[in-house]
Amino acid sequence: MENKPTVGITLGDYNGIGPEVVIKTLTDERIFHFANYVIYGSRSVIHYYTKALKIQNFQVNELTSFEKLNTKIPNVVNCWNDQVQIAPGKATNEAGADALIALDRAISDLQQKNIDILVTGPVNKQTIAAKLPDFRGQTEYIASKVGAGKSLMMMCDDKLRVGLVTNHLPLKEVAGAIDMNGIFSKIEMLHQSLTQDFAIHKPKIAVLALNPHAGDNNLLGKEDREIIAPAVTKARDKGMIALGPYPADSFFGNHYYRHFDVVLAMYHDQGLIPFKTLTFDTGVNYTAGLPIIRTSPDHGTAYDIAGKDKANAGSLRNAIFAGLDILRNRADYAEMTANPVERVSIERE
């Protein structure tokens, strides 16, 4: 395939399962038919895990210049000292600091258009925060680095898509963090992303309530009637197909999500518990609203199984293909909207 896109993949925390799922994914030669791959980490970490996993003949190209990009085997950008202390299953501040270095290098290459898509391996927020106290997650960090004032965490699978109004926030702070304009902005962002990134015409958006029973006519809280419902109404007035707020328990319990293209949850666990229950090992985390394309597997570092050849690479593989689909959809959308007058004229002939 000529002019293949290039996918950058960070190993994440090298004491977790990130290196294992990356290696397992890239041992399948068929995946190179679709893209070129650049691993951000180090050759020594790759060597350590191929040996631990007893994987033979996993060749990599040590990349010093993108002019020397290898299109047939994985490329590795050495971001760390080769003498890093690898300790599978252990959370160390060194691993957190190194994961941040690799992430920064990958973001830089993405901004310089050396890579087309960024897939991030799982990290430990606490060990990175030891180096960068304000760190709250890769989603927020990447958004700040690429200059995006707004972004939206969206979990994706063939069965279900879930967007979040608030991300990594203590539950006690959620009610104070939502407002009508903020929720409307998230609905608008979902509408644009599903249209542009997922090629869905007139996407149907379900919005979940914050309180049990959607507040039960203000008996259990006023946010649903006074904040969320007006945001949904505003979205409909703007021509979007948005419905809600729906009580989360009955919405998922009665499988109403099957009738929508995406669900907007108010907080992290409200959306991710049903998502991960329904999409075990296959879900993808996508950051919508950014000028760049970033995806990641929907699992964490999984220290308990690190280095034991037990990690399922399905989510990382899906994250790669989701990124490639979004890249293609964005190109198609840009072409279709570049000259809408001309396009309408052609369609009428």
Image (spheres, rainbow, N blue to C red):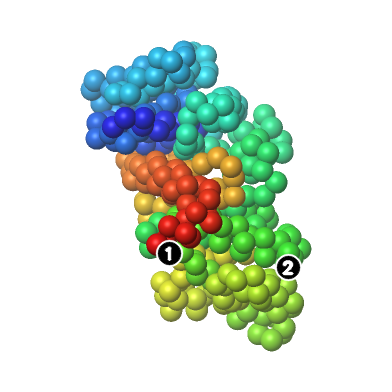
Q: In whole angstroms, how far apart are the C-alphas of marks 1 and 2?
A: 40 Å
Task: For the N terminus, give its image quadrant.
Answer: top left
- On residue 180, the disc is 2
Which x, y percent locates residue 279? 39, 58
* Label 2 element class: helix
Which x, y percent locates residue 319? 41, 44
Indicate which label's residue lies in the foreground, 1 or 2: 1
- The amino acid on which the numbered mark 1 sits, given as a three-letter code, is Arg
* Label 1 element class: helix
Instruction: Classify residue 144 as left or right of residue 112.
Output: right
* Figure check: 207 above or below 292: below
Mark 1 Cα shell of 10 Å, populated few (<14), some (14-19), many (≥20): few
* Figure check: 4 above or below 270: above
Mark 2 Cα shell of 10 Å, populated few (<14), some (14-19), many (≥20): some
Front-most of residues 124 and 74: 74
Front-most of residues 270 and 26: 26
Instruction: Classify residue 279 as left or right of residue 131.
Output: left
- The amino acid on which the numbered mark 2 sits, given as a three-letter code, is Met
Residue at (60% x, 71% y) in the render: 239
Q: Quadrant of residue 134?
A: top right
Say if residue 286 shows up in the picture: no
Which x, y percent locates residue 136? 65, 43
Instruction: Classify residue 309 as left or right of residue 191.
Output: left
Residue at (49% x, 66% y) in the render: 203
Residue at (47% x, 56% y) in the render: 343
Question: To which residue does mark 1 refer?
Answer: 348
Front-most of residues 346 and 159: 346
> Is the C-beta separation of discs 1 and 2 under 8 Å?
no
Residue at (31% x, 30% y) in the render: 2
Q: Give the number of callouts.
A: 2
